[in-house]
Image (cartoon, helix red, strand yellow):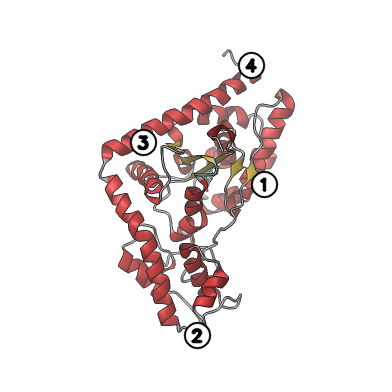
């Protein structure tokens, strides 16, 4: 298929620290796989990140590290557009216009806003409230057809569609109304210590619950060996065996097998041996990514260039959409 006929995929991730194995197997690994079939645009959402307080030096580092990590995973900056959100001014400009086409009532219904304002009660800022509008601007600037998002962002994608349709109803066909992208294989990885809940850095204080993509590999293996299981010593998928089921899902996602195939491989295997196999598979997956990350990080000039080129490519597309919008609403352009 020629480049022009490919559908456009847009997604973004906040630079809130090194992604977990759950983020990787649930999202990032897919992002890499989509790059052949689609025109992919991936952003580091650092403007979204400042809706909660950040240390500036840390945020700059995390932004750069996350972009570098995307590349280390195999997301090719030549084939895709990989950029930092704040480098493209059109995001802030379109977000303002879209703010004027979004209702307080709809934003008040966003469950993430409710959750985050409960969590950051001392800093319920307007940015936290209008966060979904910025996200809509991200997506709509690039005429995205498809947006791979997790469950927690579904409502934000819905409001993006509503805003786009509302604007189009008034001004004609300006925006592409995006659909969610549901991956054919998508792993939902749970915590190693709390397998009833998603593996997520913010959800737990227990460091053994989460494997981070840049964890020391020995430490990552230990976390798997300490993962909670149950007492019947049978490796099988079952809702009443959340720990073992999760490890099977991790193994399956890493090796590209189905969970059932994975289950079949470990019939009659004890927990100790099973965990070792899972740990080995995870380590072999992470090792080359970590090596590549190290290598890329040491080439500062190259990363600078990728960031600069990405911003230019993104701005070219974004500015076209922005100009169209500005013309429609009556700005002198
Ligand atoms: N809000 C998303 C998250 O926290 C990140 C994000 C920002 C995003 N802009 C986006 C995701 C546009 C998809 C499309 O996960």
Instruction: Give residue 135's quadrant in the image.
Output: top right
Is 329 rendered above or below residue 175?
above
- Spatial CA distance of label 3 from label 2 is 49 Å
Residue located at (57% from left, 25% from top): 321
- Spatial CA distance of label 4 from label 1 is 30 Å
Q: Which residue is mark 1?
A: 109
SS state under label 3: helix
- Spatial CA distance of label 2 from label 4 is 70 Å
Point out the frontmost of discs 3 and 4.
Answer: 3
Image coordinates of residue 147 in percent, x first then y, are: 58, 44
Point out the frontmost of discs 3 and 1.
Answer: 3
Q: Which residue is mark 2?
A: 268
SS state under label 4: loop
- Spatial CA distance of label 3 from label 4 is 35 Å
Q: Earlier in the sequence, mark 3 or mark 4?
A: 3
Circle 3 Cα neighbour tier, 10 Å, few/some/many (<14 / 14–19 / ≥20): some
Q: Nearer the viewer, residue 125 or 2?
A: 2
Image coordinates of residue 33 in percent, x first then y, are: 50, 50
Residue located at (41% from left, 37% from top): 78
Is 142 rendered above or below residue 278?
above
Q: Which residue is mark 3?
A: 306
């Amino acid at each position: 298929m020629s480049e022009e006929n490919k559908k456009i995929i847009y997604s973004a991730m906040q630079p809130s620290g090194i992604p977990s194995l759950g983020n990787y197997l649930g999202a990032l690994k897919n992002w890499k796989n989509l790059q052949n079939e689609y025109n992919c645009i991936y952003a580091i959402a650092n403007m979204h990140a400042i809706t909660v307080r950040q240390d500036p030096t840390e945020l700059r580092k995390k932004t750069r590290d996350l972009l570098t990590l995307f590349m280390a995973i195999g997301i090719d900056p030549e084939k895709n557009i990989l950029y930092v959100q704040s480098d493209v001014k059109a995001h802030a400009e379109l977000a303002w216009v879209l703010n004027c086409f979004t209702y307080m009532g709809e934003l008040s219904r966003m469950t993430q806003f409710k959750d985050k304002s409960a969590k950051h009660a001392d800093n319920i800022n307007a940015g936290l409230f209008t966060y979904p509008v910025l996200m809509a601007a991200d997506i709509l600037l690039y005429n995205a057809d498809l947006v791979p998002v997790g469950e927690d962002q579904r409502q934000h994608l819905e409001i993006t569609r509503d805003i786009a349709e509302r604007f189009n109803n008034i001004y004609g066909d300006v925006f592409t109304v995006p659909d969610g992208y549901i991956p054919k294989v998508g792993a939902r990885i749970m915590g190693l210590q709390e397998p009833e809940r998603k593996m997520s850095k913010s959800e737990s204080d227990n460091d053994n619950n989460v494997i981070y993509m840049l964890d020391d590999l020995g430490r990552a293996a230990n976390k798997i060996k300490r993962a909670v299981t149950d007492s019947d010593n049978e490796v099988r998928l079952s809702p009443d065996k959340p720990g073992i089921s999760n490890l099977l899902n991790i193994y399956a996602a890493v090796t590209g097998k189905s969970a059932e195939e994975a289950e079949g491989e470990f019939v009659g295997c004890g927990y100790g041996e099973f965990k070792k196999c899972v740990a080995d598979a995870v380590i072999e997956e992470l090792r080359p990514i970590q090596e590549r990350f190290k290598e890329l990080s040491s080439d500062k000039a190259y990363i600078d260039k990728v960031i600069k080129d990405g911003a230019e490519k993104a701005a070219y597309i974004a500015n076209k959409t922005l100009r169209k919008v500005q013309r429609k609403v009556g700005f002198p352009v």
